[in-house]
Amino acid sequence: MTEPDLLIAAKELDAADPLAGFRDRFLPADGVSSYLDGNSLGRPLRATEEHLQGFVREQWGGRLIRGWDEQWLELPQQIGDELGATALGAAAGQCIVADSTTVLLYKLGRAAVAARPGRTEIVLDADNFPTDRYVMEGIARECGLTLRWVRADYDGGVSAEAVAACVGPQTALAVFSHVAYRSGFLADAEAITSVVHAAGGLVLWDLCHSAGAVPAQLDAWNVDYAVGCSYKYLNGGPGAPAWAYVASRHQADFQQPIQGWLGSADPFGMAQGYQPAAGIRRLVSGTPPVLGMLPMRDMIALIAEAGIGAVRAKSVALTEYALTAVDALLAPHGVVVASPRDAAQRGSHITIDHPAFKAVTAALWEQGIIPDYRNPSGIRLGLSPLSTSFEETFTGISAVLAELRR
């Protein structure tokens, strides 16, 4: 297809898009004509601007300290339940908002290895997000464990077969990303979880690059633990708190490694000696970040309105269109697709590689074209289904072509 043909196709796809109206729910960004980085930081909702102003004025300013007793202390679990029902396939009482992804990875990882005493290995893949690897390296050092690495293809990710070759009687925990941060590979979480369980280990899934764009079924997949951030497809804003899932069967024995007052059985009793709260609240350590968690509630409601199935269908359509445009316009200039071409194995972003892309990305940002750069030579096109249009996707890819032609 030619550049004019691709533009016509984008306009037609936008006209037929049943979710097109949702784009108006997001605040516009002055000077930005193509925002293709929703997999790093989602755009803010108009409703969030209004709700935050109202909260400061009416809740924080009006209720003051009374707000904690009236509703704020319950928000982490309430929002967790909403997220679980809307996008994670998790029954109530298993998800909670707290801390950062890094801190939650540590909490869940430490609890998991404590739940498998006598086992000596943590299994993870060498191309997982650095935080996941670094946190598990620290846990292994603290607990005297060994890291066992699963290898994955550069343009792919972890398969059940590769995991089966690495797990065994010494596996305490396996840690993988549902969608790979670089390639966008969508792992078969159900099959991999089954493989690890067959070896007697536990599984911790990182859903940072899938929650809100790719449906999950944590309960049906028999997942043990999961974690994810909320500032990507959940549009919680920069530094928004993360969320965690602990299957109900693991909660009674969950050993909290960061024992804080709010995760205790009676926080306001101020008793001597820590006694954990019942249920998912024992995962909490300190005071919940109320202001930080409010925006994600707005986005969860929007996803619920659209339907996570429809969101996924739009994601697939966007990435399919982007691949078509890359093949037609950029491949002749040496650009290589470093993501799966099978939609069933792909999340909501694709990565394309070219030696000039670091400089190209900087030039694009100056023009209000915002993709994402990842070493060693990749541009990630993050296509957030409810805020990204097909024409916006075309604009970004066309701008990459213009830079390569210079």
Image: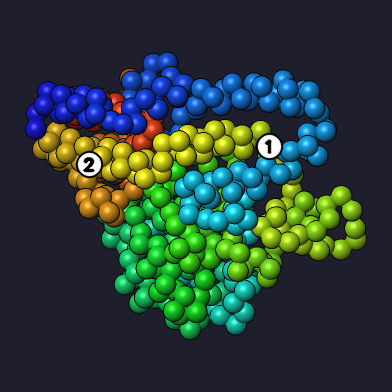
Three-letter amino acid code of the residue under disc 1: Val
The residue at the point 48 percent across, 83 percent down is 169
Question: Quick check: can you spot residue 190?
Answer: yes
Which of the colour schemes (rainbow, by chain, secondary structure, one colour) is used?
rainbow
Location of residue 288 by image quarter: top right
Three-letter amino acid code of the residue under disc 2: Glu
Mark 1 Cα-neighbour bin, 10 Å: few <14, some 14–19, many ≥20:
some
Q: Quadrant of the C terminus?
A: top left
Q: Position of residue 334 (x, y in %)?
A: 15, 41
Position of residue 62 in the picture relative to residue 321 (left or right): right
Q: Secondary structure at mark 1?
A: helix
Q: Earlier in the sequence, mark 1 or mark 2?
A: 1
Location of residue 280 by image quarter: bottom right
Q: Position of residue 282 (x, y in %)?
A: 71, 58
Q: CA distance from mark 1 to mark 2?
A: 38 Å
Q: Nearer the viewer, residue 156 or 271?
A: 271
Position of residue 125 in the picture relative to residue 219 (left or right): left
Q: Residue furthest top?
A: 30
Please give the residue where the numbered disc 1 appears in the rendered image. Answer: 290
Indicate whether 57 appears above or below 252. above
Mark 2 Cα-neighbour bin, 10 Å: few <14, some 14–19, many ≥20:
some
Q: Quadrant of the N terminus?
A: top left
Q: Position of residue 93 (x, y in %)?
A: 63, 56
Q: Position of residue 42 (x, y in %)?
A: 46, 33
Indicate whether 99 appears above or below 362. below
The residue at the point 50 percent across, 26 percent down is 45
The residue at the point 15 percent across, 24 percent down is 8
The residue at the point 53 percent across, 75 percent down is 172
Position of residue 264 in the picture relative to residue 317 (left or right): right
Please give the residue where the numbered disc 2 appears in the rendered image. Answer: 320
Q: Nearer the viewer, residue 344 or 399?
A: 344
Indicate whether 297 appears above or below 192. above
